[in-house]
């Protein structure tokens, strides 16, 4: 079940030990994990308290990736205080201006903001991949799509051809894994709710990054697909096409990158369909069900790409229309 938004009992002592003893602690957000966030308001200053309780969570990856990103010219929160044994971090507060709400409120800014976050990825991909991260490649991609067969299909009482499912995915993913693009740091949850607008900064630093503790080393198309095929907000197809073109033109990538984009978008969206069912059935977080129609819309568009014919044929044979978006509406 989702954890209640009550600060842990040891939070006041942690804050007092680091000079924030007079601060208010207000609920800010939970997420799909066990992590919770609180806004800490002191006299003339504010910060964010991250509660990442062990044994479910470990804040060390967040600290390591944040410090690496900051060292490479990107805007991740500064770590103001830490208690790693209890899973508590006090981090820089980027405010409330998320990309999602900003772009929704002013649609005429969408293309400009998505150009900025595309350029951020281009900058990130020009850096050497962060050392020590897990690899995200063919074996992992196949493991991730199993969330669809393991959670989505049983929940909707679908009797599917599991062997054919994995065979189809391997057929379309294997060429992407061998397409020759150098591996890069993959933030993995790069989307409009994890990108903040930091107005006092310029250029790519204008976009503050959150929720990157699961970073991996993988294909450069993955995070671009993540932000342009967003599970939580509709990115206009024209902006998606323009940003894919922008990335290819600015990096000199060949057309194999475009194929990788559609294949990895389909892989990611299939995984998320399963993840959202697991969050509902296992963790009691039923709010994620509302995103399923959007996920199906994205996946069905991805499956129209010629590189995905084997996977599209499997879905056509195994998942009827009434078990897709219609099941969630």
Image (tube, rainbow, N blue to C red):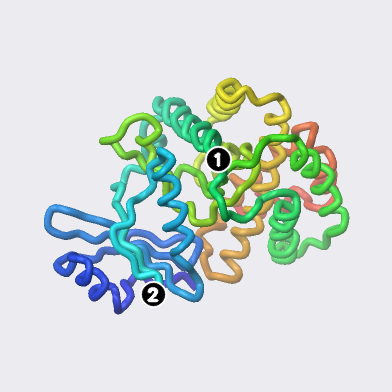
Q: Which residue is mark 2?
A: 86
The correct choice, above or below, for 256 with respect to 309 in the image is: above
Q: Which mark is residue 128?
A: 1
Q: Nearer the viewer, residue 51 or 280?
A: 51
Residue depicted at x 20% and y 59%:
41
- Image location (x, y in percent) of residue 155: 70, 65
Identify the residue shown where x is 56% and y is 44%: 129
Question: Which percent across, then down, holds residue 89?
Answer: 35, 64
Instruction: Please tell me whether mark 1 sits on a helix, a strand or a loop.
Output: loop
- Number of the label disc, if any, that sits on residue 156: none
Q: Could you tell me residue 259's position as x and y percent? A: 72, 32
Query: Do the CB atoms of the residues marked 1 and 2 lie less than 8 Å apart?
Result: no
Residue 99 placement, left or right of 24: right
Q: Is residue 276 left or right of residue 149?
A: left
Q: Is residue 27 visible?
A: yes
- In the picture, residue 214 is in which quadrant? bottom right
Q: From the viewer's perspective, is residue 242 above or below residue 68?
A: above
């Amino acid at each position: 079940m989702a954890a209640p938004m009550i600060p842990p009992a040891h939070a006041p002592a942690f804050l007092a030990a680091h000079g924030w003893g007079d601060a208010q602690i207000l609920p800010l957000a939970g997420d799909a994990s066990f992590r919770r966030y609180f806004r800490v308001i002191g006299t003339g200053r504010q910060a964010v308290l991250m509660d990442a309780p062990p044994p479910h969570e470990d804040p060390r990856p967040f600290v390591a990736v944040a410090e690496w990103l900051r060292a490479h010219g990107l805007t991740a929160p500064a770590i103001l205080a830490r208690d790693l044994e209890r899973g508590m971090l006090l981090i820089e507060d980027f405010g409330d201006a998320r990309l999602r709400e900003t772009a929704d409120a002013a649609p005429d800014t969408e293309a400009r903001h998505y150009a900025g976050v595309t350029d951020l990825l281009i900058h990130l991909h020009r850096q050497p991949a962060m050392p020590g991260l897990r690899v995200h490649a063919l074996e992992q991609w196949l493991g991730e799509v199993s969330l669809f067969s393991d959670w989505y299909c049983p929940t909707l009482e679908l009797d599917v051809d599991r062997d054919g499912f994995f065979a189809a995915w391997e057929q379309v993913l294997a060429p992407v894994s061998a397409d020759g693009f150098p591996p890069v740091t993959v933030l993995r949850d790069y989307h409009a709710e994890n990108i903040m607008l930091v107005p006092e900064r310029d250029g790519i630093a204008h976009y503050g990054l959150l929720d990157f503790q699961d970073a991996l080393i993988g294909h450069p198309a993955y995070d671009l697909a993540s932000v342009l095929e967003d599970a939580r907000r509709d990115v206009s197809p024209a902006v998606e096409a323009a940003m894919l073109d922008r990335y290819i033109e600015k990096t000199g990538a060949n057309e194999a990158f475009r194929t990788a984009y559609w294949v990895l978008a389909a892989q990611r969206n299939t995984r998320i369909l399963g993840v959202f069912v697991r969050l509902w059935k296992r963790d009691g977080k039923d709010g994620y069900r509302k995103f399923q129609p959007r996920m199906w819309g994205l996946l069905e568009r991805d499956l129209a790409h010629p590189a995905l014919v084997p996977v599209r044929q499997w879905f056509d044979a195994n998942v009827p229309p009434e078990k897709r978006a219609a099941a969630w509406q």
